[in-house]
Amino acid sequence: MPKPPPGVAERDFQAALRELESVVGREWLFATDEDVLLYRDGYSPLWGEAEERLASAAVAPSSVEQVQGIVKIANQYGLPLYPISTGRNLTYGGAAPAYSGSVVVDLKRMNRILDVSARDKTCLVEPGVSYFDLYRHLRTNKIPLWIDTADPGWGGLIGNALDRGGGYTDIEFRDHFDAHCGMEVVLPTGELVRTGMGASPQAKTSQLFKYGLGPWVDGIFSQSNFGIVTKMGFWLMEEPEAALQVSVTVPKRRDVVPLVDTLHSLMCAHTVPSQVTVASPLMAGNNAELVRLRGSGGASDADWDRFAASAGGAPFWAASFVYYGPSKVIAAQWEHTKERLSSIAGVGFRETASYTFPLTDEQVEAVADKARYGIPSLNLFGSRTAPGAPPLEGHIDFSPMIPPHGEELIALSDYTGKVYADQGFAPSFVAGMMFHPRTMICFHAVPTFRNAADNARTRKLFETLVRGCAERGWPIYRIHPVFQKLGMEMFAWGNGSLQRLHETLKDAIDPNGIVSPGRYDIWPRRLRGTRA
Amino acid sequence: MVDRRSFITSAVAFATAVAVGNETEARSKASTPADTVLAPAESALAIVDCDASGCEAFAAAARSRGVRVLEFSADVATLWMRELEPRLRSGAVVIEGHTSAATQFCLEFLARDYGARLVHRAEAAAAVTWTLSSSPARRAALAPIESRRSQSHA
C-alpha cells in the first residue's frame, strides 16, 4: 500500500481517504499500489531511488464543489494535494507530485467545454479539457476557430497554460498563459475566486478583458501552488483565409546573426506572425567530426564552415515559420521578408507548404507540420523509433532562454555541447525557438534511465547545465519538479527576495500548506527547511 | 464478469509495468499472442499503420476474423479523436494494433484513462503488434466516465 504523507499518521491518512471517498465516490478514490503507480513519472531522474517523488493516493473530482470538499479534508488532516489537469507532459514530471506522499487531485473528469463563442473568438473550459477535445469540438461543430496546441497535442489547455507552455501560431495565442482571459480558482482555504472581469457577476466581458479592476493576480497561479484552477477562458484564433509555410536557409555558421536579427525585427513588426524555429540541420546526427566539433566547446567558424562544405554544401542554418491571413497580404509579407534578408550572401528561400482554409479531413491528414495550424498531433513521438536511434528510456527537457541573437545561440550550443561531451553524453540537438518574439527557448533533451548510476550522471549533467547557463545569462524558463529547487536558486537576486515573497504569499493564501508543497520550491511554513 | 481487482492482478499488472518502465519483466509475464486473438465482435477493432512493415498481412488477418480494420499513416492523433476515444468512452473494447512503437506507447498511455490496459505486445521488424483491452468493471485513475461536453455555444 502507498505510504501516508510525511507527518500524517496512518490512522489519520486512512480516515482522510474515507472522507475523500465520501466526497467523490468509491470509484474515484485511488489508494492501491496498482492505481497510484499510474501517477508515477515514467521519466523520473530519480527512478527507483528513495527520493523519487511518489503519490500516496489520487482522487478524481468531477465538480468544483468536490474540489472544495477535498480541500476541506486536506486542511483538516494536513494532507498535501497535487492537482494535475491531464498530467501528460512527460518531460516535466508527468503526473507525479513535487512532494512525495501528496494526494494527486486528478482533474481530468472535469472536462466540460463550458462555452465557445465564434463571435468573440473565446472559450471557457475546465481543467480536464485536452487539446484533442477542444479541437474536435470546434471541427465537429464547424466553428471557424483554431486552437493553439502544444506539441505533442495530448495535453490539456489549462495545465499547459499554467506551466507557461507554448505553441506555434500567432503570438496572441501561442504563449498559452498569455492567451488566457479569466480564471476560477479554489483557494487552499476552500474559497472560490474568479479573476479579471469574471469577478463582476454580470460582466459580459469575462473572456474578453483580462484585468478586471484592481490588482491583476492571475500570474501567481502559474508555476506555483496558490490554488486549484477549475476554469480558464482562452482566446482562440480566427481561421485564416490561407497560410504559407516557408523556410529560409543561410550557408555559413555566422550567418545566423543577421538571420535572427532580421527575423526578430520582422516578428516585432508583426510581419512574421508565427513561432520561428532556427535550427542547424548540419548539427543533427552522430557523425564523428560533428561530435568532435560540438564537444570541443569552441570550434571556429572556419572549422564549422569546412564541416558544412564537407557535408555537400548544405546550408548551415534553416529558419521555418508560417504566415496566416489573406493570400494577398501573405504574398506581400513574404516578399518583404525576402527583401529584408536578401543581403545575406547565399540566402535561400523556399515555400514548403501552402493551404487555403477550411481543410477537408483528407487535407488535414496530409498536413506535415500540424501544430503550426492548430491541429493536435502525436507526430513528435515518431523520433522514438527513428532508424538507428539509441534505446530511449526517457528524457527530460532542459530549456534555457536566450536573447534573440544569433551569437548567443552559437555560444549556447558551444557551451552545452562541451558539457554533454565532457560528461560522456552525446550533445543534444539545439534549436532556437522563438515562442516569444523577444527571446529564444533552446530545448535540450537530457536522457533519463531506469538505473541509479546512470541517473546520477543525468542529474549531474542537468545541474551543470542549469548552473552554467544561468552564469552565462541563460536561465531556464520552466523545469522538472525534481530540479525546481535548483532552478529557483538561479533566481535568487536580492538575497532570495523573490523566494521570500513567494513564501509570504504561500503563508497568507495557504496557511496549512496543503496545495502542491514544494512546487517551484515554494514551501509552506510547516515544511520549510525540510525541502523533501 | 471480470471485477476490478481481478483485472488489476492480471492484465493491469503487465500494463502498469510497461507504462512505468519495466517492460522486460512485463513481457515475460504477458499473455501470448494466441491468448489475445480477437473474436469478431462489435467491441473489437484493429488499427494498422500503413507505413509499418507487415501492415497488409496484419490487416488481412484481422479482416479474416471479421474484425473491423482502421488504417492510418504515421500520426494516430486523428484516429484517436474520431474513432478510438469515442469507442473507449462508450464502453469496453478490445483494440489490436500493428504500428510503430511510438504509436503503441501513445495509445497505451491515452487508453489507460478509459480503463484499458496493454495485454499483449510483440515486436517485429520496425513494428509492434499489440492488444489493448478495457473492462466494464474497471475505471482508470485518470478516466473521465462519460462525455460531459456541452453543446456548441457558437
Image (cartoon, coloured by chain):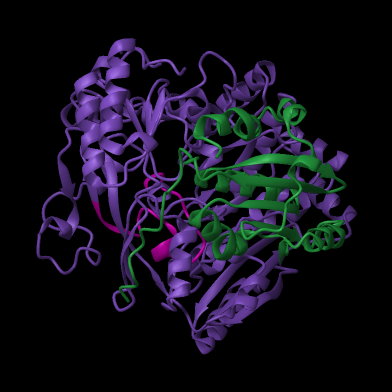
Position of B76 relative to A496 (above/below): below
Q: Residue at x 22, y 64 (%)?
A: A209
| Magenta stretch holds residue A38 | no
Q: Which chain is green?
A: B
Instruction: Spot the residue most to the bottom.
Output: A328
* Residue sitting nearer the eye, A18 or A506: A18
Q: Position of residue A505 (x, y in %)?
A: 20, 31
Q: Write down the quadrant of residue A288 in the picture.
A: top right
The residue range painted magenta reads: A162-183
Q: Residue at x 65, y 74 (%)?
A: A342
Q: Position of residue B101 (x, y in %)?
A: 74, 46
Is there any visible trace of residue A489 in the rendered image? no
* Count of number-bearing discs: 0
Q: Position of residue A325 (x, y in %)?
A: 48, 81
Q: Residue at x 57, y 75 (%)?
A: A337
Lateral position of residue A385 relative to residue A341, left or right: right
Q: Write down the quadrant of residue A297 in the picture.
A: top right
Lateral position of residue A514 relative to residue B108, left or right: left
* Residue sitting nearer the eye, A340 or B102: B102
Q: Residue at x 76, y 43 (%)?
A: A300
Q: Quadrant of the C terminus of chain A?
A: top left
| Magenta stretch holds residue A174 | yes
Q: Colour of chain A?
A: purple
Lateral position of residue A431 relative to residue A169, left or right: right
Instruction: Spot the residue most to the front.
Output: B1
Is there any visible trace of residue A360 in the rendered image? yes
Lateral position of residue A422 relative to residue A6, left or right: right
Position of A31 relative to A259 (above/below): above
Position of A118 relative to A283 (above/below): below
Position of A471 relative to B51 (above/below): above
Q: Position of residue A470 (x, y in %)?
A: 49, 32
